[in-house]
Amino acid sequence: MFRVIEPVEINFTVPARSAAVRKELVQILIAQGGRIKVNDDATILVGFGSNLKIRLLGAALAGIRAMPRDVLVQLNESADETEVSVVVRDTFGFGSRMGFSDKLQKQMYDDALSLKAHFLKPIKT
Protein backbone atom coordinates (compact mmCIF):
# COMPACT_ATOMS: atom_id res chain seq x y z
CA MET A 1 0.00 0.00 0.00
CA PHE A 2 2.88 2.39 0.71
CA ARG A 3 5.80 2.93 -1.63
CA VAL A 4 9.13 4.40 -0.61
CA ILE A 5 9.96 7.45 -2.68
CA GLU A 6 13.53 7.36 -3.95
CA PRO A 7 15.52 10.62 -3.91
CA VAL A 8 16.03 12.52 -7.15
CA GLU A 9 19.62 13.45 -8.01
CA ILE A 10 20.88 15.68 -10.82
CA ASN A 11 24.25 17.30 -11.51
CA PHE A 12 25.15 20.19 -13.78
CA THR A 13 27.94 22.70 -14.28
CA VAL A 14 27.56 26.47 -14.22
CA PRO A 15 30.21 28.73 -15.80
CA ALA A 16 30.42 31.04 -12.77
CA ARG A 17 32.06 31.29 -9.36
CA SER A 18 30.39 29.38 -6.51
CA ALA A 19 29.56 32.50 -4.44
CA ALA A 20 27.49 33.96 -7.28
CA VAL A 21 25.83 30.61 -7.99
CA ARG A 22 25.00 30.11 -4.29
CA LYS A 23 23.47 33.58 -4.01
CA GLU A 24 21.32 33.02 -7.09
CA LEU A 25 20.24 29.53 -5.95
CA VAL A 26 19.16 30.84 -2.54
CA GLN A 27 17.05 33.55 -4.20
CA ILE A 28 15.42 31.01 -6.52
CA LEU A 29 14.66 28.55 -3.70
CA ILE A 30 13.13 31.25 -1.48
CA ALA A 31 11.05 32.54 -4.41
CA GLN A 32 9.73 28.98 -4.89
CA GLY A 33 8.53 28.94 -1.27
CA GLY A 34 11.43 27.10 0.36
CA ARG A 35 12.59 27.50 3.95
CA ILE A 36 16.38 27.75 4.25
CA LYS A 37 17.69 25.29 6.86
CA VAL A 38 21.42 25.42 6.04
CA ASN A 39 23.28 27.98 3.93
CA ASP A 40 27.05 27.80 4.02
CA ASP A 41 29.81 28.04 1.41
CA ALA A 42 29.32 24.60 -0.14
CA THR A 43 25.87 23.41 1.02
CA ILE A 44 22.31 24.71 0.84
CA LEU A 45 19.50 22.73 2.49
CA VAL A 46 15.95 23.93 1.90
CA GLY A 47 12.63 22.52 3.12
CA PHE A 48 9.47 22.53 1.04
CA GLY A 49 5.91 21.50 1.85
CA SER A 50 4.18 21.02 5.18
CA ASN A 51 4.10 17.86 7.25
CA LEU A 52 1.20 19.25 9.33
CA LYS A 53 -0.88 20.23 6.31
CA ILE A 54 -0.47 16.78 4.73
CA ARG A 55 -1.32 14.96 7.97
CA LEU A 56 -4.44 17.09 8.55
CA LEU A 57 -5.75 17.44 5.00
CA GLY A 58 -4.02 14.72 3.03
CA ALA A 59 -2.38 15.11 -0.36
CA ALA A 60 -5.73 15.07 -2.16
CA LEU A 61 -6.91 18.28 -0.44
CA ALA A 62 -3.60 20.01 0.34
CA GLY A 63 -2.06 19.35 -3.08
CA ILE A 64 1.06 17.51 -4.04
CA ARG A 65 3.24 20.63 -3.58
CA ALA A 66 2.41 20.46 0.14
CA MET A 67 4.18 17.11 0.51
CA PRO A 68 7.24 17.66 2.74
CA ARG A 69 10.58 17.33 0.99
CA ASP A 70 14.13 18.65 1.27
CA VAL A 71 16.28 20.05 -1.50
CA LEU A 72 20.00 19.62 -0.84
CA VAL A 73 22.35 21.59 -3.10
CA GLN A 74 26.09 21.07 -2.93
CA LEU A 75 28.55 23.30 -4.77
CA ASN A 76 32.06 22.41 -5.86
CA GLU A 77 34.13 25.12 -7.55
CA SER A 78 36.99 24.39 -9.94
CA ALA A 79 38.62 27.10 -12.04
CA ASP A 80 35.82 29.45 -13.10
CA GLU A 81 33.10 26.80 -13.07
CA THR A 82 30.88 25.47 -10.34
CA GLU A 83 29.60 21.90 -10.28
CA VAL A 84 26.12 21.84 -8.77
CA SER A 85 24.69 18.65 -7.26
CA VAL A 86 20.97 18.70 -6.41
CA VAL A 87 19.28 15.99 -4.33
CA VAL A 88 15.55 16.17 -3.60
CA ARG A 89 14.27 13.71 -1.00
CA ASP A 90 10.89 12.94 0.51
CA THR A 91 10.77 13.79 4.23
CA PHE A 92 7.24 12.62 4.99
CA GLY A 93 8.69 9.59 6.68
CA PHE A 94 6.94 6.50 5.42
CA GLY A 95 6.50 6.84 1.69
CA SER A 96 3.34 7.63 -0.15
CA ARG A 97 0.05 5.98 -0.86
CA MET A 98 -0.58 4.50 -4.28
CA GLY A 99 -1.63 7.10 -6.79
CA PHE A 100 0.29 9.92 -5.15
CA SER A 101 3.78 8.44 -5.32
CA ASP A 102 4.14 9.09 -9.06
CA LYS A 103 2.89 12.66 -8.64
CA LEU A 104 5.32 13.25 -5.78
CA GLN A 105 8.20 11.80 -7.79
CA LYS A 106 7.30 14.15 -10.67
CA GLN A 107 7.18 17.12 -8.27
CA MET A 108 10.61 16.19 -6.94
CA TYR A 109 12.01 16.04 -10.49
CA ASP A 110 10.38 19.41 -11.23
CA ASP A 111 12.03 20.90 -8.13
CA ALA A 112 15.47 19.71 -9.26
CA LEU A 113 15.08 20.52 -12.94
CA SER A 114 13.75 24.03 -12.27
CA LEU A 115 17.11 24.88 -10.68
CA LYS A 116 19.02 23.51 -13.66
CA ALA A 117 16.73 25.26 -16.16
CA HIS A 118 17.42 28.61 -14.53
CA PHE A 119 21.11 28.36 -15.44
CA LEU A 120 20.62 27.10 -19.00
CA LYS A 121 21.33 29.70 -21.64
CA PRO A 122 19.51 29.55 -24.97
CA ILE A 123 21.71 28.72 -27.91
CA LYS A 124 21.81 31.61 -30.39
CA THR A 125 21.71 30.63 -34.05
Image (cartoon, helix red, strand yellow):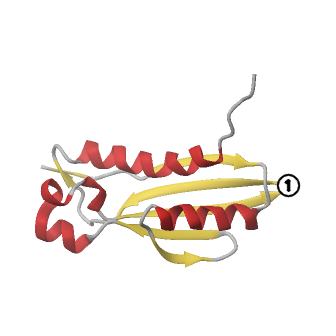
Q: In this rendering, would 47 be left or right of 42?
A: left
Q: Position of residue 75 (x, y in %)?
A: 68, 62
Instruction: Please report the residue visible at 57 percent of the width from the left and 66 percent of the height from the top.
Output: 27
Q: In this rendering, would 82 be left or right of 117?
A: right
Pick out the residue farthest to the front. 125
Quadrant in the picture for residue 122: top right
Q: In this view of the protein, which residue sits in the foreground, 100 or 94?
A: 100
**82 vs 93: above or below:** above
**124 vs 57: above or below:** above
Pick out the residue farthest to the right. 79
Quadrant in the picture for residue 79: bottom right
Per the image, label 1 sits on a secondary structure element best described as: loop
Instruction: Please report the residue visible at 49 percent of the width from the left and 64 percent of the height from the top.
Output: 31
Q: Position of residue 42 (x, y in %)?
A: 68, 69
The number of callouts visible is 1
Q: Position of residue 97 (x, y in %)?
A: 16, 51
Q: In this rendering, would 115 be left or right of 32?
A: right
Task: List the residue tagged with mark 1.
Answer: 80
Q: Position of residue 108 (x, y in %)?
A: 39, 51
Instruction: Please report the residue visible at 18 percent of the width from the left and 57 percent of the height from the top.
Output: 59
- Within 10 Å of disc 1 (Cα), the crowding (few <14, some 14-19, many 20+) is few
Which of the image's four quarters has the C terminus? top right
Q: In this rendering, would 122 be left or right of 70?
A: right
Instruction: Please report the residue visible at 30 percent of the width from the left and 56 percent of the height from the top.
Output: 65
Q: Amino acid at mark 1?
A: Asp
